[in-house]
Structure formats: structure tokens, C-alpha cells
Amino acid sequence: MRRPPGHGPPLASHAAVRLLHAQGSCAVVHPADEEQMSADGMTAADIAAIQNHLTMLRVNNLVPTRHGILQNLLDANGAPANPRIRPI
């Protein structure tokens, strides 16, 4: 799962987005997640960086709202969607 520098998002932010998508805005690294990450070759430092990234997003109110939730809000209020916004 590691990527060379300059090739895609950093490991922690990529994994954090995957957890946010799966768990929602209160995502954390659960023991089962940690076991899977370790089995996938991540180190304890990698996993800590993912948890720290999730915490930083929450503390700074930077957790992105999922595309489906945003689309439902737009539809309910008759607002046009911006086609340049890509879902996460």
C-alpha cells in the first residue's frame, strides 16, 4: 500500500479517506482495521499516522461530507450541483 513520493496521496490521508467513507465522519482505526492494515504490510507508525490524520481532520472541522449526503441536500433544496466537484 506504500507509494513512492509524488505518486498519489500520502498513505495516511489515503487510508483515512477510505475509513471515512466506510465509517462516516467519526471514523477511527478499530482493532480489526489495525489487524488488516498490519496484514497489508503497514507498520505501527503508519497506523498511528492514519489515526492522527483522522483526529486532525475532526479537530479542525475538516472531515469531508460524503457525496451522497451532499447530493441529497442539494436535491432537497432544489440547488444545482456543481459538475466540477468530484465525489470522494
Image: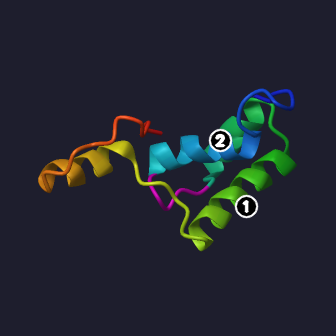
The kind of secondary structure the magenta stretch mainly shows is loop
Q: Which of 66 and 40 lies nearest the eye of the viewer?
A: 66
Q: Residue at x 65, y 40 (%)?
A: 14
Q: Position of residue 68 (x, y in %)?
A: 30, 43
Give the extent of the magenta segment.
24-28
Q: Which residue is mark 2?
A: 15
Q: Residue at x 47, y 39 (%)?
A: 88
Q: Quadrant of the N terminus?
A: top right
In the figure, is residue 88 to the left or right of 57? Answer: left
Magenta region includes residue 35: no
Q: Which of 16 and 32 lies nearest the eye of the viewer?
A: 16
Type of the residue with mark 1: Asn
Q: Secondary structure at mark 2?
A: helix
Q: Which of 9 and 74 lies nearest the eye of the viewer?
A: 74
Q: Quadrant of residue 54?
A: bottom right
Q: Which residue is mark 1?
A: 52
